[in-house]
Amino acid sequence: MVAEAKQNGVATMAGSKAQLMSVKRREPALVSPAEATPTGEQYYLSNLDQNIAVIVQTVYCFKCPSGRGNEGAADALRAALARVLVHYHPLAGRLGISPEMKLTVECTGEGVPFVEAEAACDLALIGDLSTPDPAALGQLVYSVPGAKNILEMPPMTAQVTRFKCGGFSLGLAMNHCMFDGLGAMEFVNSWAEMARGATELTVPPFLDRSVLRPRAPPVISNPHYEFEEIADVSEMAALYGRQELMYRSFCFDPDRLERVRGLALADGDLEKCTTFEALSGLVWRARTRALGLAPEQQTKLLFAVDGRRRFVPPLPKGYFGNGIVLTNALATAGDLLSSPVSRAAGKVQEAVRMVTDEYMRSAVDYFEATRARPSLASTLLITTWSRLAFNGADFGWGEPTMSGPVTLPEKEVILFLAHGKERKSINVLLGLPASAMDAFQELMDEI
């Protein structure tokens, strides 16, 4: 299955969808914690939080059960948000800069912008959220007008949109510096628990991020190529500048995923291989070919590894913050394309094994010493939501019928998203220049 949308010169179907939705927003209101919370202090963000301060927009869609409309949805979610913010009070603050010139949260308690809206269509018009669609889905998420940088944006916003059919959507814009995917899932599920009447959270947040403070003095014990700048000898910047960015999603059902693993294991170079390793190797190689990179072009694969259980000691249950660490693999385009899939999958495997407690603490210390940011030049960044159970977000109207991202945060990002009721399939979402997308499509059709 392939779904498509275009950015800038928006495809006709996507453009008409955006027009038909015609979402009308009310003025935002601030939702503050329902009880007094600490104010007047700065909330520490770790070095793992500093490097991923990007806004992630997601949408959850709900069909109302028979006999129950959507009239009370906004009020219920607003009241539950106030209660859950007592536990997650930094989300009610505002981002600032610490004396050390790092991002921090000013604990002001002023609240989360909450918007009610109405769409002039049924929920069915949205489709299945299998492909990012900024023009249409962006109407379901509130962005602060005129904000020039993240310091002018709150850590999160929420928008509840009612549809003519009786369904509704919850659109969230959340700064990645506040939590990674698992942390965001635990927050949304905790919010849903409060909406269903819970008085205690199943997984209370552990707020103290100082457990990830850098060592003094910093100890950089590993190479960190994730920060390395790579020369663009293939003139990719020019290609992206000439052609519009097209989004497509490619569905890998269990049978297709097994074929991908079979490709990675076919020549016997790897004794075993996970689905993630095989699929990552496949798309890294296919994207490299589709973009027509020069054989001597150095390429970098970045992906996040959950460090919660890899740290020594492990991070506390409910850790509120980013517990993920970027790892990397390097190869020239010529090496990738002249070798079987096992070569790329093996490099992914090596990158996973590299993530030890010492590697992660070295990464924390590397930022402390250099303040470097990961470079995305000639890079593919894979992020995976395939293990996140966002479908458990039942606010009292049942589980969401679908959920997904509004857009991808950067053109270099590919997202792995669980698909289907049993979540055994994986949707691969990506954006490429038009000519490269057609080439990538042909490569995927061969699987």
Image: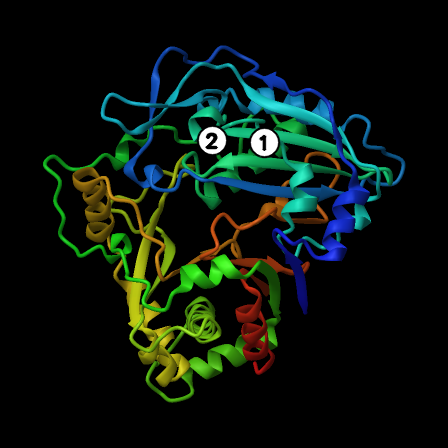
Q: Quadrant of the N terminus?
A: bottom right
Q: Are marks 2 and 1 in contact (CB under 8 Å)?
A: no
Q: Quadrant of the C terminus?
A: bottom right
Residue 37 image point, x, y percent: 46, 13
> Which residue is at the far right?
67
Query: What residue sits right under mark 2 in the picture?
Result: 204
Mark 2 / mark 1, whichever is N-terminal: 1
Foreground residue among 390 and 240? 240
Foreground residue among 314 and 407? 407
Query: What residue sits right under mark 1 in the picture?
Result: 143
Write the residue at 32% across / 84% down. Answer: 269
> How many labels were placed on the picture?
2
- In the rendered image, is residue 339 in sight? no
Residue 217 image point, x, y percent: 10, 36
Write the residue at 58% across / 66% down. Answer: 434
Left or right of 150 in this view: 163: right
SS class, disc 2: loop
Q: Amino acid at mark 1?
A: Ser
- Name the image quarter holding residue 151: top left
SS class, disc 1: loop
- In the rendered image, is residue 206 in sight? yes
> Above or below — where is 368 with respect to 278?
above
The 10 Å Cα crowd at callout 1, few under 14, some 14 to 19, many 20 or more, is: many
Q: Amino acid at mark 2?
A: Pro
Write the residue at 33% across / 63% down. Answer: 232
> Above or below — where is 260 with respect to 251?
below
Residue 289 image point, x, y percent: 45, 76
